[in-house]
Amino acid sequence: MRREASRDSLINLILPLALILGLVLLLSLNVEGGGEGRETTPLEIWLKVIVGYLAAGTEIAAAIVIGGAVIRGIAAYLRLLFSRSKQHFDATEGIRLQLGRVLALGLEFTVASDILRTAVAPTRQDILNLGAIVLLRTLLNYFLEREIQQGEQRRSSEPELDRSMR
């Protein structure tokens, strides 16, 4: 059991560091003139237009999902603020966790949008940029998911503590 805990803590340290180093490496690479001199076909032009609309739709979906969650979170917090509830901390933690879950979903939508934009005839620079963006968003998502899991564990252990104090 102790060995698994030390392995998990090592993974929790190495994974973010590896992602950050990968991001720095991708950002330091600068490929010039990757796609110049290449002839584009009419089908490729149409595909780029269609995929551009799909990517824009995905970005709009991400904005709607995140914006709706923010509005819902603000409304829930205002209801909590003006109510006479004694469970203020527990309720705000719940609002925070709910917002975190939706932010993770929004990040997935934005990653999908970036992948769509790079799907049709990418240059090397496009692929490097996509790799850097995906690494950065994966890193954000990793820490967000970890924070959500820790918050859910705290919430699930609090009722047990309350019962043991009675």
Image (cartoon, helix red, strand yellow):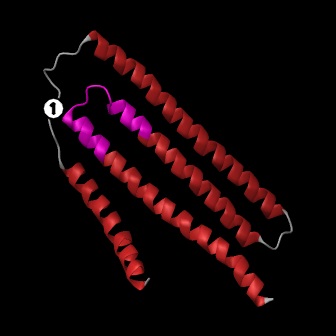
User: In the rendered image, which residue does mark 1 sit on?
Assistant: 34
Disc 1 secondary structure class: loop
Magenta stretch? 112-131
Residue at x 25% of width, y 56% of height: 22
Percent position of residue 88, x then y: 76, 70
Image-based side of 57 in relation to 49, left or right: right
Percent position of residue 117, x then y: 36, 31
Percent position of residue 73, x then y: 69, 53
Percent position of residue 99, x then y: 62, 55
Residue at x 33% of width, y 64% of height: 15
Residue at x 34% of width, y 51% of height: 135
Residue type, numbered disc 1 = Gly
Residue at x 58% of width, y 54% of height: 101
Give the farthest residue toward the top.
42
Q: Is residue 39 above or below residue 113?
A: above
Q: Tell me, yes or no, whether the highlighted magenta stretch contains residue 163.
A: no
Quadrant where the C terminus lies? Answer: bottom right
Q: Which secondary structure class fits the magenta region best?
A: helix
Quadrant where the N terminus lies? Answer: bottom left
Q: Tell me, yes or no, whether the highlighted magenta stretch contains residue 118.
A: yes
Name the one closer to the observer, 149 or 95: 149
